[in-house]
Amino acid sequence: MTDLNRPARLNRTLLVLTGLVLLAGGVFAVATHFGRIPLIEPGSALVPGTALPPGWAWYAVAGGAVVVGLLTLRWLIAQPARKPKSRTWRFEQDTGRTALAASTAVEPFVAEVAAYPGVHAAHATLGGPQDAPILAVVLSAEQDGDLAAIRERVTEEGLPRLRQALDLDELPTTIEFRFSTKTGPRLH
């Protein structure tokens, strides 16, 4: 990856590792209980004393484990960046019908924005229905890139051209900046 979003990568990595350790522990406990792993006798006590805990304790532990598991799964699912769902736009005219993939519609915009000074890479997703579209733009900026200048150029040059090409009066847009490890050209 060229962006410096190391905390998010570390976060995802630790979540995956924690999940794998917990899953391995659960498989080990179940396999030991049913005698598939002869490391511990299935009938031996894990804690001192012979009294069983009350019946509600088993349900409380199981319920707590399910809640923690679902919360962890929800956290893991929330980690990737969300993009609006892309659709195919259909234009009907007297001469016939035209189908345009939303991803194809934004390719010239992405190519233009990627060529701006200070931009390392650009990605855009045009989503939503044709009557209420939304554009999500992710720009990887170089370390010394001027974010204000890039945003101004996108909003004053790139977006008006895209709206004109798509024949839209309004195009709600979100722009997310990420930083690349690449720096811009330097004069010596």
Image (cartoon, helix red, strand yellow):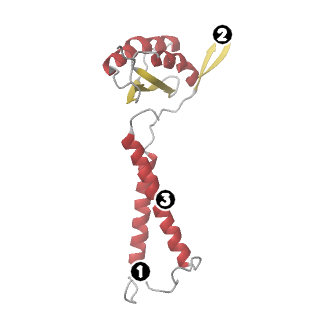
- Circle on res. 55: 1
* Amino acid type of the residue tagged 1 in the rendering: Gly
Q: Which residue is drawn at 48% across and 32% down?
A: 84
- Circle on res. 20: 3
Q: In what quadrant of the picture does the C terminus appear?
A: top left
Residue under numbered circle 2 = 94
- Badge 3 density bin: few <14, some 14–19, many ≥20, Cα 10 Å: few
- Disc 2 secondary structure class: loop
Q: Which residue is drawn at 42% across and 67% down?
A: 63
Q: Where is residue 47 in the image (x, y as percent from the top left)?
A: 39, 83
- Badge 1 density bin: few <14, some 14–19, many ≥20, Cα 10 Å: few
* Relative vertical location of residue 160 with respect to residue 45 in this rendering, above or below: above
Mark 1 or 3, closer to the camera? 3
Report the Cα–Cα distance between label 2 and label 1: 73 Å
In the current view of this chain or complex, which residue is farthest to the bottom? Answer: 50
- Circle on res. 95: none
* Amino acid type of the residue tagged 3 in the rendering: Leu
- Badge 2 density bin: few <14, some 14–19, many ≥20, Cα 10 Å: few
Front in this rendered view, residue 129 or 10? 10
Give the side of residue 176 with respect to residue 88, left or right.
Answer: left
Badge 2 or badge 1: first in the primary sequence:
1
* Relative vertical location of residue 2 with respect to residue 49 in this rendering, above or below: above
Report the Cα–Cα distance between label 1 and label 3: 29 Å
- Disc 3 secondary structure class: helix
Q: Where is residue 105 in the image (x, y as percent from the top left)?
A: 55, 19
* Relative vertical location of residue 28 with respect to residue 126 in this rendering, above or below: below
Mark 2 or 1, closer to the camera? 1
Badge 3 or badge 2: first in the primary sequence:
3
